[in-house]
Amino acid sequence: TRHSQYFKATSKQPQSNMYKLTVASLLLTSASAFSPAQVGKASTALAADFSQEVGVQVPTGFYDPLFLLSGADQDRFDKLRYVELKHGRIAQLAFLGQIATRAGMHLPGNIDYSGHSFSSYPNGVAALFGPDAIPKEGLLQMIAFVGFLE
């Protein structure tokens, strides 16, 4: 009986240590999520190596199917990355605009001086083409404004 008490007392010790070790390792791994990311140095060589840039995925590596960066320098890479991010954000806003108008949310007020409200026009592609579409002049004004912003 004396030995059984010894084994009961010591059997809790490894479980307690294992628990502490597990908690400590979880804390360390979660803390690494907030550590600063490694940033590669910019190269000024004419034919830069982009295989170490942020966003390169393991299965495909650096993916440039149209060879837009063959022989390009770091400035060209940075410009194309900036344009890609900007166009991605515009696409996200366009998607949200589709979702919002399909849900019935429209801007208050009138779209023109004739008294046509924003909600009087159909949603989606029907707002551009069809019998109830936005007039061509209004569509050209929108395209010109987006071009000005670009």
Image (cartoon, rainbow, N blue to C red):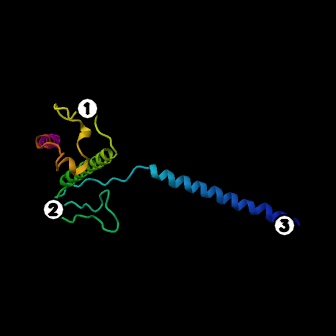
Identify the secondary structure beneath mark 2. Answer: loop
Disc number at residue 149? none
- Note whether 140 is above or below 56 in the view shown: above
Mark 2 in CB contact with mark 1 (< 8 angstroms): no
Percent position (x, y) of residue 134? 17, 43
Q: In the rendering, at what x and y percent does residue 135 appear?
A: 13, 42
Dot 1 amino acid type: Gly
Residue 78 in the image: state x and y as whole percent.
22, 52
Q: Residue at x 82, y 63 (%)?
A: 6
User: Hey, what amino acid is under mark 3?
Assistant: Ser
Left or right of 32: which side holds 92? left
Cβ atoms under marks 3 and 2 closer than 8 Å = no
Magenta span: 140-150
- Decide which of tag 2 and tag 1 comes sooner along the chain: 2
**Residue pointed to by mark 3:** 4
Gap between marks 2 and 1 measured at Cα: 52 Å
Q: Position of residue 107 (x, y in %)?
A: 28, 36
Quarter assignment of residue 15? bottom right
Mark 2: few/some/many CA within 10 Å (<14, 14-19, 20+): few
For marks 1 and 3, the one nearer the N-term is 3
Question: Nearest the camera: 11 or 133?
Answer: 133
| 33 on left or right of 129 | right
Residues under labels 3 and 2: Cα distance?
75 Å
Main secondary structure found in the magenta portion: helix
Disc ID at residue 109: 1
Q: Which residue is mark 2?
A: 71
Taking the view exactly as shown, the residue that stands out farthest to the bottom is: 59
Of labels 3 and 2, earlier in sequence is 3
Q: Nearer the viewer, mark 1 or mark 3?
A: 1
Question: Element under label 3?
Answer: helix
